[in-house]
Image (cartoon, rainbow, N blue to C red):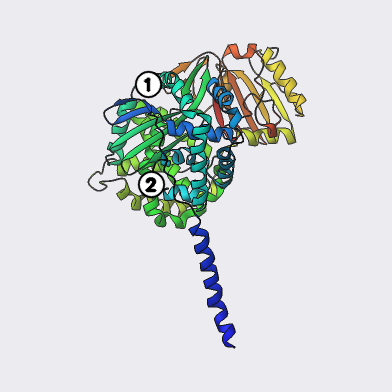
């Protein structure tokens, strides 16, 4: 072999390394970013509820980029009106690129809270596949957006609205200031600050975040009715991520060998934004803690109902982890002084469940989208209970199904195949099919509060008679006196009341 050939590989490596060096040398430093705006907040001790200018700014940019575009609240409309001249601003265009790269969901508020930090966290860099240049360019562009759009004037003019949101949240969550103590006692670790960040531009989604000394719960709007915003009550869940995720990260190698257990729910989980075994473990352990929290605050019946709902969603290990918390972790504080110290035992248990082959028998309930696609391709029967066949809602609903191309026919009872059941909440069939939401006469009970007007419960499930899916649509009497709402997901034929909730299995809507 000639000397030239011997030198070929080393020279090639040098060229590649030089190219890499050049590419990295052109990554600009993280820009200095400071807003001369203070959060609107209400605090008690080291616990605060706030609307933060950094998260609002970032949500405005990402909203203009198309994120959460189904938010049609008055606040979202004001954002659209004020910032519409900047829809094609460089910050918005880069936000669209960042969304394509993976900077969605929880990464949006994480990015917001790191705008004024000295460097990007590894978590955030990983979300954009290592593209620090994109993060830096987006931050610079958002800094220009602040100046050019006069974002500060918009934020200042909405401070009273933000105060109202905090007041509404505290009214709905009177025990929120005591929640951090519960979390610290369970996970056996103290934190310096706890911040609940309300996100009026984010609908249906809530997230957790943390730094070394601060825990965040970023809470979106879960319902809007009669001019009132109601924020998602996922605080216990979101705060728990600050303890669970680092523990899973530190012990992931002990669980990695059982990742086949993710395979039966992989597709369903991806539709909810959980695309890996590691993320699935995070969610499973957090939701098992959530069941424990419900047990202590609402009782055993509510906790078991919650577990059944989680298992139907595809989190089939929640019940087992929950029982491990109850029987092993919780009573043995000396053996497990921290949650992290319990990880090896959870990994051992996971190994046993893996050997049982439990995961091979898992079949999660369908999403609303899955049910509707089956109805569209294979046809569907409508079972209308309690003499509401001639109601305004049912007549209009049948008509819109036909316009959308569904082959729909009526049936006099629940039978095999694909069936849509439309019924008042107090019917026998509603109680028989519903498994996850508490129904009390003609109302639903959520977080201890009873709702008896303008409420629709929707659940997608496998037909207990076999051969297809059932979509249960149960409402309070008043909803049948009006037509179904329009709008929603273009890919799902537009017409269904809940079509915009395509990746959910069940929903409670107000209107």
On screen, 73 above or below 366?
above
Q: Can residue 417 be seen in the rendering of this structure?
A: no
Nearer to the camera, 398 or 415: 398
The quarter of the image holding the N terminus is bottom right
Percent across and percent down for residue 235 are 40, 31
**Is residue 52 or residue 320 the one in the foreground?**
52
The secondary element bearing badge 2 is classed as: loop
Disc 2/disc 1 C-alpha distance (Å) = 33 Å
Q: Residue at x 60, y 14 (%)?
A: 479
* Residue ranking furthest to the bottom: 1
Name the residue nearer the viewer: 317 or 5: 5
Find residue 240 and report its horizontal and vertical position in percent. Answer: 37, 38
Q: Position of residue 296 (x, y in %)?
A: 33, 30
- Say if mark 2 contacts mark 1, CB within 8 Å: no
Tell me the element at label 1.
helix
**Residue extending furthest front?**
148
Residue identifier under label 2: 118
* Label number found at residue 217: none
Dot 2 crowding, Cα within 10 Å, few <14, some 14–19, many 20+: few
In the rendered view, would you say 8 is above or below 491?
below
**Which quarter of the rendered picture does the C terminus lie within?**
top right
Q: Is residue 157 visible?
A: yes
Direction from residue 150 to residue 239 in the image, left or right: left
Task: Choose between 269 and 298: the one closer to the eye.
Answer: 269
**Percent of width and height locating residue 183:** 32, 36
- Give the side of residue 309 with respect to residue 185, left or right: right
Disc 1 crowd, CA 10 A, few/some/many (<14, 14-19, 20+): some
Label whose residue precedes the other's in the sequence (2 or 1)? 2
Residue pointed to by mark 1: 170
Which quarter of the figure has residue 5?
bottom right
Is 466 situated left or right of 335 in this image? right
- Residue visible at 51% across and 37% down in the picture: 144
């Amino acid at each position: 072999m000639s000397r030239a050939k011997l030198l070929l590989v080393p020279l090639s490596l040098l060229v590649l390394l030089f190219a890499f060096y050049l590419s990295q040398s052109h990554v600009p430093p993280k820009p200095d970013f400071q807003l001369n705006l203070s959060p609107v907040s209400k605090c008690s001790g080291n616990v605060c509820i706030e609307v933060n200018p950094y998260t609002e700014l970032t949500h405005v940019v990402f909203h203009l980029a198309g994120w959460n575009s189904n938010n049609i609240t008055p606040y979202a409309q004001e954002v659209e009106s004020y910032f519409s001249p900047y829809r094609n601003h460089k910050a918005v265009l880069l936000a669209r690129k960042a969304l394509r790269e993976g900077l969605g969901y929880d990464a949006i508020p994480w990015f917001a809270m790191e705008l004024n930090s000295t460097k990007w966290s590894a978590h955030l860099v990983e979300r954009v596949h290592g593209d620090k240049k994109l993060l830096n360019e987006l931050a610079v562009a958002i800094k220009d957006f602040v100046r050019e759009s006069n974002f500060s004037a918009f934020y200042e003019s909405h401070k009273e609205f933000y105060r109202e949101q905090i007041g509404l949240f505290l009214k709905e969550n009177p025990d929120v200031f005591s929640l951090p103590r519960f979390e610290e006692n369970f996970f056996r670790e103290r934190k310096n600050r706890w911040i609940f960040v309300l996100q009026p531009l984010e609908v249906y989604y809530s997230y957790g975040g943390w730094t070394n000394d601060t825990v965040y719960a970023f809470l979106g709007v879960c319902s809007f009715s009669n001019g009132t915003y109601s924020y998602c009550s996922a605080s216990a869940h979101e705060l728990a991520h600050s303890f669970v995720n680092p523990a899973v990260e530190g012990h992931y190698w002990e669980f990695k060998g059982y990742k086949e257990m993710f395979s039966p729910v992989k597709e369903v989980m991806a539709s909810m934004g959980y695309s890996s075994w590691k993320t699935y473990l995070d969610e499973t352990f957090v939701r098992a803690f959530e069941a424990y929290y419900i047990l202590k605050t609402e009782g055993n019946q509510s906790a078991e109902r919650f577990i059944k709902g989680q298992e139907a969603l595809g989190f089939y290990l929640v019940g087992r982890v929950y029982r491990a918390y109850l029987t092993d972790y919780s009573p043995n504080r000396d053996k497990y002084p921290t949650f992290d110290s319990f990880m090896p035992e959870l990994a051992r248990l996971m190994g046993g469940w893996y050997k049982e082959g439990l995961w091979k028998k898992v079949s999660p309930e369908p999403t609303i989208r899955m049910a509707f696609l089956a109805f569209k391709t294979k046809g569907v029967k409508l079972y209308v209970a309690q003499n509401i066949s001639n109601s305004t809602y049912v007549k209009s609903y049948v008509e819109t199904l036909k316009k959308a191309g569904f082959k729909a026919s009526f049936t006099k009872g629940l039978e095999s195949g694909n069936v849509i059941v439309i019924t008042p909440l107090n019917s026998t069939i509603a109680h028989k099919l519903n498994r996850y939401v508490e129904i009390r006469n003609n109302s639903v009970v959520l977080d201890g509060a009873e709702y008896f007007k303008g409420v629709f419960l929707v659940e997608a499930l496998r037909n207990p008679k076999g051969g297809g899916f059932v979509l249960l649509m149960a409402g309070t009497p008043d909803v049948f006196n009006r037509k179904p709402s329009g709008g929603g997901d273009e890919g799902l034929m537009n017409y269904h009341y809940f079509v915009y909730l395509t990746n959910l299995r069940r929903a409670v809507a107000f209107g």
